[in-house]
Image: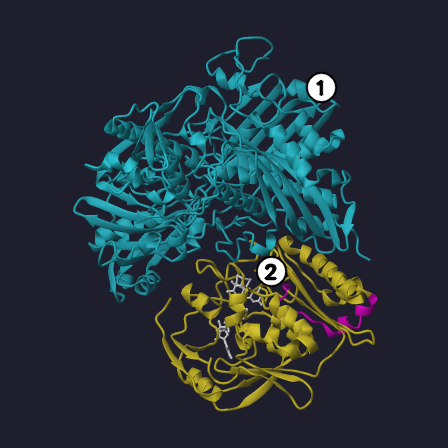
Chain colours: A cyan, B yellow
Amino acid sequence: MKFETAATVNPIDRMKVIGWPTERIDGPFKATGRASYAYEWHDVVPNQAYGYIVASAIAKGRINRLDVSRAKQAPGVIAVVTAENAGKLGKAQRNTATVLGGPEIEHYHQLIAVVVAETFEQARAAAGLVEVDYTREPGRFDLKAECDSATDPGKITGGKSDTTVGDFDRAYAAAPVTLDATYTTPDQSHMMMEPPSTIAAWDGGSLTVWTSHQMVDWARSDLATTFGMQKEKVRVVSPYVGGGFGAKLFLRADAVAAVLGARAAGRPVKVALPRPLSVNNTVHRPATIQRIRIGAEPGGKITAIAHESWSGDLPDGKADGAVHQTRLLYAGANRMTATRLATLNLPEGNAMRAPGEATGLMALEIAIDEMAEKLGLDPVEFRILNDTQIVPDSPSEASDDDPQAGAPTEGHESPERRFSQRHLVECLRLGAEKFGWNRRNPRPGQSREGDWLIGLGMAAAIRGNHMTKSAARVRLDRRGIVTVETDMTDIGTGSYTIIAQTAAEMMGVLLDKVVVRLGDSAFPVSAGSGGQWGANCSTSGVYAACVKLREAVAQKLGFNALDAVFEDGHVRSGGRSLPLVQAAGDGEIVAEDMVEFGGITEQYEQATFGAQFVEVAVDAYTGETRIRRMLSVCDCGRILNPTAARSQVIGGMTMGVGAALTEELAVDKRFGFFVNHDLAGYEVPVHADIPHQEVIFLGDGDPMSSPMKSKGVAELGICGVAAAVANAIYNATGVRVRDYPLTLDKLLPGLPAIS
Amino acid sequence: MKAFTYERASSPEQAAQMVARTPNAKFIAGGTNLLDLMKLEIETPTHLVDVNSLGLDRIEATPDGGLRIGGLVRNTDLAADLRIRRDYPVLSHALLAGASGQLRNAATTGGNLLQRTRCPYFYDTNMPCNKRTPGSGCGAIGGVTRQHAVIGHSDACIATNPSDMAVALRVLDAVVETVQGDGKTRTIPIAEFHRLPGGTPNVETVLAASEMITGVVLPKPLGGVQLYRKVRDRASYAFALVSVAAVIRKDGGSRVALGGVAHRPWRVEAADARLADGARATMAELLADARPQPENAFKVTLAERTLAAVLAQARI
Ligand SMILES: Cc1cc2nc3c(=O)[nH]c(=O)nc-3n(C[C@H](O)[C@H](O)[C@H](O)COP(=O)(O)OP(=O)(O)OC[C@H]3O[C@@H](n4cnc5c(N)ncnc54)[C@H](O)[C@@H]3O)c2cc1C
Ligand code: SF4
């Protein structure tokens, strides 16, 4: 199915199953331990051995000598694999560093050996006996120090690295009110609960991995590339994933080590990354330094806006797309954005929880708050004043080859690019009303309750609504059971449930007649989970397959597919009504299709919008910040399941609190590694940090987004939250902190004097 | 983790004997610290002596009006004991500010006193650390030091003692009771129990390797307002940046100790007398010799402000 024109009325609009707060259909499996996570497939293949990883002790340099002789002789050891005996390995398209290091070392905790033994304990003990002699080389570990040598990466996710519209410099110089401020965000770690884990089994030239991955098909092709085999010979199984947040988009050491170990041992091998390795061995969100300049008229209209960002990565790595949303969020005739990428020898940076917007809005939405204060405007009103239904950066983005690109846009040539839907103003207004924004004292540091300084803060949110093709297979069997098969993953998001709801709605049956099977490369290739595209795209793929199944059913029953109504387990047309199950009377009916996006989805800018509101209390003595209330108002298309969607958004809000207050990978700039590489040192919010959270969905369907009229939801929840917290802290204390996280030491100098 | 053998003792003396006669042996109580360290091969004992069922899990009155806390009393039970809550609330508050419910259920009085530092370089066996590998150097100095000590440290080690309980015990002037393999017992005032790092940060207490903690004695109740204030980056489940244990008495005799600032709970008796003059005067005495790292200089300010908060609360 091609989705190229706006959706019209379709069976999903009935919303008899879709849109209801259905409980997770996989909930009982998880609660009773029957949902196997990657490391727990104890019975799928017999004779599983255990692999334990040896990781590099240096960040950059070479291995002079790697002596595995003692490890090999240790009790229970079956095999030890290093770069020396691993054979030739390819490098997967999505990997920056080589997964198996040696003799050259590219980053700290890079995989250098895997020890396979009969038991986990034996493997771990033997791994401790591997002796490595290194030569350290000086590396670059300090983003700030490397900014001057940073270069233009050419592109960032979602567009070009640099854009210009109008004449920023002139407009900024002429603006009566201006802001020029620099913000920093630290390296951060995904810290999902389930560590990256894999069981690998070879069968002749065929490989099966049970792993924990967000994108089954990516894992499959990355494994094929790495091990130089045909993709068809690789099977990836990943039906339950214990969180990912972007960390499990890529092939990591657990999978490579398990596959190598299994090949060397001649039997299945399982490997999990211990917690310390999930920081320096995998990917992380890179730190940024962001400079923002805004010029406005005294009335509050933005006339000039610039956003520049610096981040670092290993050679040939990727830049963080922090500037991207600044091309879309606020109006203003003269604009520029720029991205520079420095070479760093820290572990590889990559996608994490709304990559781009999450970091970009941490800076931009403080800058907007600062600007509103300079202008004497309420921050909500200032944002509304600069809202736009037209994509502000569209001229230059749309006219790639036009030598005139970037010239003032007065006039004609560049067609205006619009958002498919944009209800940011509604989010802001509704949020302000529900949150009691009018109770905020615009003068900071004025509200006090006992020892607590109280402040309100807010921020706008935007996050792209990405579309990628997604396929599914649907079966109707003799018992009337509808089974959906797709390689879509459920990373804790609720995919099983919304996919079941989609199939039930389309086929006119109750949920108890639907079975959903996910996360297996034997199934049709889906959009996978990432970039908040999973729900909208994968259900649209299921929709497409169900349309096919409905046609087949109608034909079988002698109905005209176009006017047949699927309802209450029956198919009706004209005056006739037959049970759905009758269509499968003489055998299962199978239909498969894929949704592909184009046309309208490209002509319009696709994004989700929101408004984040936060109340904080800051201890006047110690500077400890406690969040008191949070509200998120979200404009993200039709909500397929309010319970699942809310759970996604409050998760995002919680991560936003972490980003604001505690989350920071501390870099040792001498040894070149993230020092706090466990959950004791890297502090994510605990229950006591998170108060009552409220989420409101505007809930309008967006017919330009997909046949489901839904959009991405989850990552919108984190966007803007950290800045809203920072703005609330400013409102509470009068201390403006531009360097995340806002730990108490940064507030202490500005707190009231003590008697 | 290295392979190890395991046995259960039937009396404290026997436990101490077992540890004394087996090279590289250690006691194991709740295991909440020791097992983590063994998994990471920071501690590599080859023999464990389990001291969990020796009847040391009781809290009893002493003849001079205090309490004797068995060395194996769980942190949860100690914090919940009615006598502790009534007469030594600073201890109860300190315990409840530490770790999590599950950990406190397993953690013991003796184990808590001997828990090791949370210095991240100590935790990463690729890094130099004089405490873990004497003579290898200190990885932390010049590196990431936000959590580290501001006073009492040496050029060899700037680690802090992470225990909350110990700070309360210090302000209460508790006494540690031990037994050794030859049956000899002794008492050690808490002030002398933990060592400063000096040139041997690997030696953290005055205990002999095979000396077992049998109990901790609290002198008779001090009365006054007893407060424990722990400041950290998140609301729960984090080690202290700074903590203050205080006993504030109108008639003089007030006391204060700090956690999170040194290699042991930090108390300077001369500072107690300045409490009546306020936080600044007290800190001028208590942290007079502070030599913070660039990253943790804020701890000095934070300690003073936290004490001010405690004093304000005590006055209400
Ligand atoms: C995630 C986490 C968070 C934590 N947070 C905090 C916190 O916020 N505040 C805090 O104060 N603590 C905290 N802790 C530490 C916790 O309090 C200690 O782990 C616990 O008190 C240790 O007691 P245990 O009985 O388990 O000791 P074990 O782990 O059994 O032993 C610790 C050490 O003491 C020795 N030992 C034990 N008993 C005796 C004895 N009777 N005589 C002689 N030697 C003995 C052992 O040989 C070992 O060296 C935390 C721990 C964890 C894992
Ligand atoms: S501060 Fe102490 S514990 Fe930390 S690295 Fe230095 S010597 Fe080791």
Is residue B279 shown left or right of residue A224? right
Number of marks drawn: 2
Labels 1 and 2 in the same subunit: no
Q: Is residue B240 visible?
A: yes
When asked about the image quadrant of residue A302, the answer is top right
Is residue B196 shown left or right of residue A545? right
Q: Is residue A723 above or below residue B264?
A: above
Q: Nearer the viewer, residue A237 or B174?
A: A237
When asked about the image quadrant of residue B304, the answer is bottom right
Name the residue carrying label 2: B148
State which chain disc 1 sits on: A
Q: Nearer the viewer, residue A244 or A296?
A: A244
* Residue drawn at 33 percent across, 48 percent down: A211
Is residue A299 shown left or right of residue B201? right
Where residue A610 appears, as percent x and y from the top left, is 58, 34
Q: Quadrant of the C terminus of chain B?
A: bottom right
* Mark 2 Cβ inside 8 Å of ligand 2: yes
Name the residue carrying label 1: A174
Q: Amino acid at mark 2?
A: His
* Mark 1 Cβ inside 8 Å of ligand 2: no
Circle 1: is it few (<14), some (14-19), or many (20+) Cα within 10 Å?
Answer: some
Is residue A579 shown left or right of residue A204? right
Where residue A148 appears, as percent x and y from the top left, is 55, 33
Find the magenta span and give its range: B260-277
- Asked if the magenta segment contains residue A680, the reply would be no
Secondary structure that dominates the magenta span: loop
Where residue A517 appears, as percent x and y from the top left, is 32, 43
Q: Quadrant of the N terminus of chain B?
A: bottom left
